[in-house]
Amino acid sequence: MPAPGVPPEGAPLELKKGDYVPPVSPLKLTSEQFAKISGKWTGKLEPPPGPNGQTRTLTMNVTFNTNANGQYVGSIEVPEQRLKVSINEATLADGTLTLKINSVPGGGGYTGKLSGNTVTGNWSQGPSSLPLNLTRTP
């Protein structure tokens, strides 16, 4: 019997080349809230050194826009990891932006204080939390 998540031997496998399109998760924001965060935001995340002491900086591109159906949607892209995932939930209350990303291993999220074109906050993934400040890009 194969391990969990491994298809049985002889099972057909089909791979297709192309861009991955993450599933759409419409965000439940008012038009006023969406206007405050719409556009592209960028920040740098600095995870702790790896097992061999290597360090790296990850670019976090957070985008909020409307899709073809007029729904508010958001995504996070990390170019260094060739990763793009949908934001599943977003709230903006009392100047605090909170994001939830279900597809990140261990669960991902962000909470930060919005002030004009900057958000000062923390990225969390599993039990870890790291500073991540975002700036709206033109």
Image: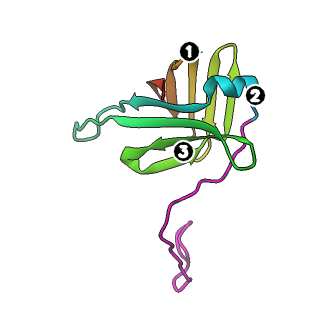
- Residue located beneath label 2 in the image: 31
Q: Residue at x 36, y 33 (%)?
A: 47
The vertical placement of 79 against 121, above or below, is: below
Q: CA distance from mark 3 to mark 2?
A: 27 Å
The vertical placement of 100 against 118, above or below, is: below
Q: Nearer the viewer, residue 65 or 109?
A: 65
Quarter of the image that includes the N terminus: bottom right
Q: Amino acid at mark 1?
A: Gly
Is label 3 or label 2 in front? 2
Where residue 113 sits, quadrant-wise, is top right
Q: Decide which of tag 1 and tag 3 comes sooner along the chain.
A: 3
The answer, for residue 109, to whether it is visible in the render is: yes
Label 2: state its secondary structure. Answer: helix
Crowdedness of circle 3 by 10 Å Cα count: few (<14), some, many (20+)?
Answer: few
Dots 2, 1 in contact, CB < 8 A: no
- Residue located beneath label 1 in the image: 116
Q: CA distance from mark 1 to mark 3?
A: 28 Å
